[in-house]
Amino acid sequence: MAQGFEADPCAKCEELLQPFLDRELNDAERAEAERHLDGCSYCRKRYRFEEQLRRFVRRAVVEEMSPDLKAKLAALRTPL
Amino acid sequence: MSETTPEAEPRKLAEEARDRVRFEEEALALADQVYRVARRLVSTREEAEDLMQETYARAFRSWRSYQPGTNLRAWLLRILTNLNIDRGRRLQRTPDQQPLEEGDYFLYNKLEESGDTDEERVDRRLSQDDAVVALAEVPHDFRDVIVLVDIGDFTYADAAQILDIPIGTVMSRLHRGRRILKKELAERAVGSRV
């Protein structure tokens, strides 16, 4: 069950990690998370780690299209 | 000049040909970006290449149904994900309710427990292959959303439109999918079942 920052601040901050990084929090939630992060190195480290992890996965899984496929797609165009 | 003149019909055809060529050029210019997403929606490069060709063949046939000024990349990916689903992928569908109660700090905590306190631990503990395999292990429904949002840079709203699911479902699948991904990565980083 979702709890507020008063009851268990780090659990609440963990819950907000993903919408925070996705910029999907409203202003009040964001301000609350930032206030907690300012004073909590436990959560701050974990937020920084999550950002790094996303960048790492994104870079790691990118595979570029082959020139051969590019040529095949171009050949699908309607002849003029 | 009236539309009924003999010159009107060829002019109309010429305009249409010009619009079509413009559409095809714009779609081809996006192919690299579409491919990066397609590649991670399916298991192999061959599947991704087939899917791309089917997608572009269909897009070029039905170019008139694209509304100029709207998001062409999302339009192409909508075709691509529909074709991917049509290929019978849903037969292997994994139900949404598999047990997973790990939190969002899970991977960090696992690494910390294993004695690693290096800030740059992600690159050091995980290889490129680990990331590729871990992502491939995430069940399709969750992976589709992760790939569209985290690799394709689509908004929640675009992902919802592409997959034809409510935005709330995008958010919950994204949330859950990332947790599954982190659990998979933890298994590889820490080197044992977690």
Image: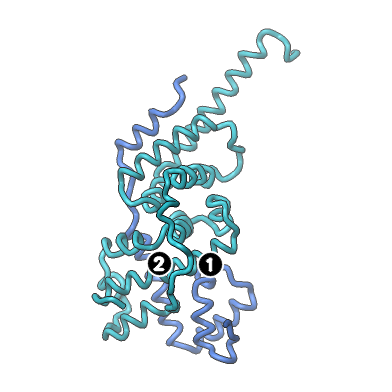
Q: Secondary structure at mark 1?
A: helix
Separation of residues labelled 1 and 2 (CA atoms): 18 Å
* Vertical placement of residue A40 versus B140, above or below: below
Q: Position of residue B142 (x, y in %)?
A: 45, 61
Count of all numbered marks drawn on residues in the image = 2
Q: Position of residue B120 (x, y in %)?
A: 30, 75
Q: Nearer the viewer, residue A79 or B101?
A: B101
Q: Position of residue B157 (x, y in %)?
A: 58, 56
Q: Which mark is residue B172?
A: 1
**Which of the image's four quarters has the N terminus of chain B?**
top right
Give the left or right position of residue B27, taking residue A70 as reference: right
- Tint applied to chain B in the drawing: cyan
Few, some or many residues within 10 Å of mark 1 (<14, 14–19, 20+) = few
Residue furthest out toward the top: B6
> Residue flagged by tag 2: what amino acid is it?
Arg
> Residue flagged by tag 1: what amino acid is it?
Ser
- Tint applied to chain A in the drawing: blue
Residue in the image at 54% along x and 43% along y:
B75
Residue A30, quarter of picture: bottom right
* Vertical placement of residue B8 versus B113, above or below: above
Q: Which residue is mark 2?
A: A54
Q: Secondary structure at mark 2?
A: helix
**Which of the image's four quarters has the C terminus of chain B?**
bottom left
Q: Position of residue A34 (x, y in %)?
A: 55, 81
